[in-house]
Image (spheres, grey):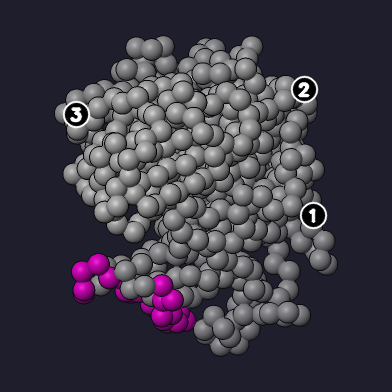
Amino acid sequence: MRRTLPIAVLAALSSALPAAAQTIYPLDRAEILAGSLFDFKVEFPGAPASDAVSVTVNGEDPAKVFGAAASFVQKEDGLDHSALIIRGATVAKPGRYEVVAKAGDKTRTVAWEVFGTPARTARNVILFVGDGLSVTDRTAARILSKGLVEGRYGGELAMDDMPNMALISTSGTDSVVTDSANSMSAYTTGHKSCVNAMGVYCSRAKGTLDHPKVETIGELVKRKAGMALGVITNSEIEDATPAGVVSHTRRRSDYNDIVKMFYDVKPDIMMGGGSPNFLPKAVPGSKRTDEENFVEKFKADGYAFVSTATEMRAAFAEGRAKVLGLFNTGNVDGAYDRKFKKGTTARFPDQPDLAEQTRLAIDSLAKSDKGFFLMVESARIDKYKHSLDWERGVFDTIMLDNAVKVAKDFAARNNDTLIIVVPDHAHMVGIIGTYDDSLPGQTPREKLGVYEKSKFPQYKPDADGYPETVDLPLRLAYSFGSYPDHCFDAKPHLDAEFVPAVAGAEKGTFVANEKYCQPGAVRVTGNLPATANSGVHAADDVLLTAQGPGAEAFRGRLDNTRVFRTIVTALGLGRE
């Protein structure tokens, strides 16, 4: 049961509460943008009554400070705790805020920094997210696309040739190693969260949509600045990184709810894969559980719906300012398979390239007189590294770099655009030498050259920076530090994405995929639990590069929440 209460400082305290202290959301040391919206929640273990608890913010009634009424729920969701909740809270005045919650003999205190921003310095912000982009991927992409001779590269990646740089730490509120959901949420809300969550703090609520929300950058730029908004990815558009721009859920797999959240915010441009969750249940292939047709809803609101690169070009050529592009039922195919393999994309032979999408989106969004925010994700860098297929991952790193170059060319014309390139998390990877097929022996360790025997491979890039082939007799030795059981032959698998492990005899376990256990390959015992069928993320800091107004804030080591703070500061979103 929920009921609205005036929140006063209450004195009656119970003495029969359990030892666990109450939890206050936002959590301790939160940095909150002045004027942003968030849900305030205090959970009291032991399910005390409302007259047995007290809450103050800087010594005052929370409802007065936050400008919204509170509700109190005893035994929230039937669980053994009570909750005081204020939805849509906001604090306009910057400063330090101390929240004190008391129940029985337990007192919990947290402190927040509410920060304002100076006048706006950036007209536009373009945020590039290389999902799982480790420093190793930058190095490998540079070798493959620019060449390396006598220790000197033949050129710079666009993402490296930027004046500002910082190390970004990615851990969430619940664990050392993050996933893409809570890491992206830090970039888009300025609040840390937990694995699988976006735009919420992870509370004790049962419902995945009931957790305390924090406003996202997509909502902010629309509500506070009237800016144009774009979201581009080569994953499903409902996947964690693109969804993090607009979504609030404890469970990243709430795809149907996420589609509705996209519809509520209405980014001007949305492009990616994942069409089944937009279509009503009655349509063959739909993944919805209702009869909502979000393709038709977007079209009714003036969006051009496109499903091929040709249709995309035509829509932008017609000057359409609102475009919904869904180019695949799943993820958009990666650069290697679209450009070179051209065999696995038979169902979707006309999928667009991220660099072209970025150029068309920028040209369209730049017509907004309020400026724009654009998020561009190269998602399959991460997905290919989960499958230990580094060659495909580096092809998509090169694709990301080509998209960054498009943005830099645009920014060079006006110098009013903040460009950020950042991974959401790392993988445990490294280049340890080269494999040389001319060396005697059959196994990978016999072909491996380290130190002075790691000679320079001669990849031959085309005009877009992609090597004509990666199946060279002398090639990089790119190594993974986390892996399931698999068979390893140190050669690229260009016929299809590598599948290291398959289901084992015991339910929920995985064993090496026998397809790859051929002469010359070695069996590798996994260093992950037997329940893992792919590599996992790492907690290593990741490398951010940036340029443009506000980019000077990126230096040294920063928490991932500082990416959000830098963006909203450059856009002046903390001013009244």
Q: CA distance from mark 1 to mark 2?
A: 29 Å
Q: What residue is disc 1 on?
A: 154
* Element type where label 3 sits in the image: loop
Residue 258 at least partly seen: no
Residue drawn at 25 percent across, 72 percent down: 504
Which quadrant, please, contains the C terminus? top right
Camera-nearest label, 1 or 2:
2
Q: What residue is disc 2 on?
A: 414
| Residue 83: quadrant of the picture | top left
Residue 574: x percent and y percent?
62, 25
Closer to the camera in the image, 8 or 280: 8
Q: Amino acid at mark 3?
A: Asp
Residue 535 at least partly seen: yes
Q: Main secondary structure of the magenta part?
A: loop
Residue drawn at 55 percent across, 49 percent down: 424
Disc 2 crowd, CA 10 A, few/some/many (<14, 14-19, 20+): few
Which quadrant, please, contains the N terminus? top left
Closer to the camera in the image, 429 or 28: 28
Q: What residue is disc 3 on?
A: 290
Q: CA distance from mark 3 to mark 2?
A: 46 Å
Question: Are circles 1 and 3 on residues that touch, CB within 8 Å?
Answer: no
Which segment is the magenta one? 505-528
Residue 166: x percent and y percent?
71, 50
Q: Is residue 97 left or right of residue 493?
A: right
Magenta stretch: includes residue 510: yes
